[in-house]
Image (cartoon, grey):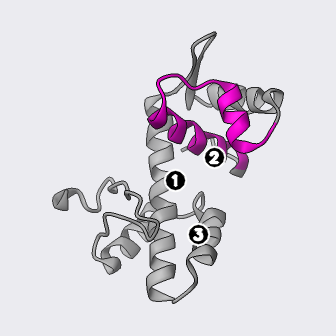
Amino acid sequence: MNKLLTRREAEYLKVAFDLSSEKTSVGSLDIANRLGVSCASASEALKRLSEKGMIIREPWRGIRLTDLGLKEVSRIIRNHRIFETYVYRLLSVSLDEACECARRVELHLSDKIVDSMCRILGHPKRCPHNKNIPAGVLCCVELR
């Protein structure tokens, strides 16, 4: 992707994704409340995500993720959950520490590395938090 997300923008994108699975309309106030920031801060971050083509802002209706936004958030979530599972299972790191470490590196992992970890783990479908792991573009396709 040529329009790299900042750590903070990725957090907003993940929250928007989570909230959109919980309710039909997601507004900047919903996101601000979830992240514990002001509505103005959330609105500014959402404006940047809109400029990067990740979301569409619809006045009085909220936001929705674009195909690009959905693809990117799925990649970030997959990176996080595969890395977290790998570190937790194979390195015997506590779940809290594995999750925190995954949060720090999720934006920087290549698909090749994540797919390799996924193969080593036997293509897990769920992370240690029992959340679904999105399938990789090339990895897991024949299994799902």
The residue at the point 72 percent across, 36 percent down is 33
Find residue 86 and report its image quarter: bottom left
Q: Earlier in the sequence, mark 2 or mark 3?
A: 2
Secondary-structure class at tag 3: helix
Does the stretch in magenta take in 87? no
x and y percentages locating residue 80 in the rendered image: 52, 62
What label does residue 10 carry, if any? 2
In the depicted structure, whether residue 23 falls above or below residue 93:
above
Tell us which disc is closer to us: 2 or 3: 3
What label does residue 76 carry, if any? 1
The residue indicated by pointer 3 is 99
Does the stretch in magenta take in 9? yes
Q: CA distance from mark 2 to mark 1?
A: 8 Å
- Pointer 1 local density, CA inside 10 Å: few below 14, some 14–19, many at least 20: many
Q: CA distance from mark 2 to mark 3?
A: 15 Å
In the depicted structure, whether residue 58 falls above or below residue 63:
above
The residue at the point 31 percent across, 74 percent down is 119
Secondary-structure class at tag 1: helix
Highlighted range, magenta = 8-37
- Is 117 situated left or right of 48 in this image? left
